Amino acid sequence: MVAWSRCCDDLAVSSPAPNRESLQRRALRLEYATIVWNVGEAGLAIGLGLAAGSLALVGFGVDSVVEVFASVVVVWHLRSTHAADHPGRTRRALQLTAGAFLALAIVLTIAGINDLVSGRQAGESPWGITYLAITVVVMFGLAFLKRRTAGELGSAPLAAEAAMTFLDGWLAAATLLGLALNAAVGWWWADPAAALIVAMAAANEARENWEEAGELG
């Protein structure tokens, strides 16, 4: 995950002014698309989760709220009057993104442990499975475009948020697999186990982003 959260020194080289403006506009469009998608995703996932009694879907909806916050942080950073790699604003953006990663790790850990301890089986949710399958494609696509744009722009906060979108894609895939296995063969533990693995990855991203922010201090 280090490649997702850190911009190499080579990426810190500024692009020509006109190109930078174009890249910033592209980055903002990607972030706005992420915000719109995740707002809808949060409401739908939480609603479907409550209907099916699925803590996994509810947890996934909460994850979407966390990613909305991370995207808002990147929009704040990109829309500043400073250069995209201004140390002070970049440091603050990385710290806020690290906080979002940590919140995500805590939410997933609590949800995963609660499901494993209680042994509670969620009801089947065909609509949830369908929506998660679409979400996997959308999140991985957005993550790829954000990562490429972050490299061209030399934006560490955008690269860090791309890592969160990438994790969101994996979380969607893990939740999808868990729901499918639960519906097909009754493996209720598959989803919370996968959620805990994603939580560990999120905690690691939080640590790396915080350390990178400290290097700018």
Image: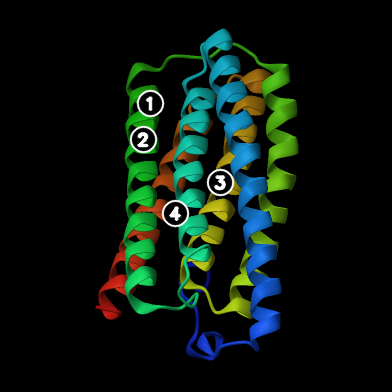
Mark in front: 4 vs 3: 4
- Mark 2 and mark 3: Cα distance apart in space: 13 Å
Horizontal side, residue 154 vs residue 216: left or right = right
Residue of label 3: 168
Horizontal side, residue 24 vs residue 81: left or right = right
Where's the C terminus, which quadrant? Answer: bottom left
Residue of label 2: 107
Element type at marker 3? helix
Q: Are marks 1 and 3 in contact (CB under 8 Å)?
A: no
* Mark 3 neighbour density, 10 Å: few (under 14) some (14–19) many (20 or more): many
- Mark 1 and mark 2: Cα distance apart in space: 14 Å
* Mark 1 neighbour density, 10 Å: few (under 14) some (14–19) many (20 or more): some
Residue of label 4: 73
Query: Does label 4 or label 1 sit earlier along the sequence?
Result: 4
Q: Is residue 46 above or below residue 173?
A: above
Query: Does label 1 or label 3 sit earlier along the sequence?
Result: 1
* Residue at x-position 65% and y-position 89%: 16
Query: Does label 2 or label 3 sit earlier along the sequence?
Result: 2
Query: Does label 4 or label 3 sit earlier along the sequence?
Result: 4
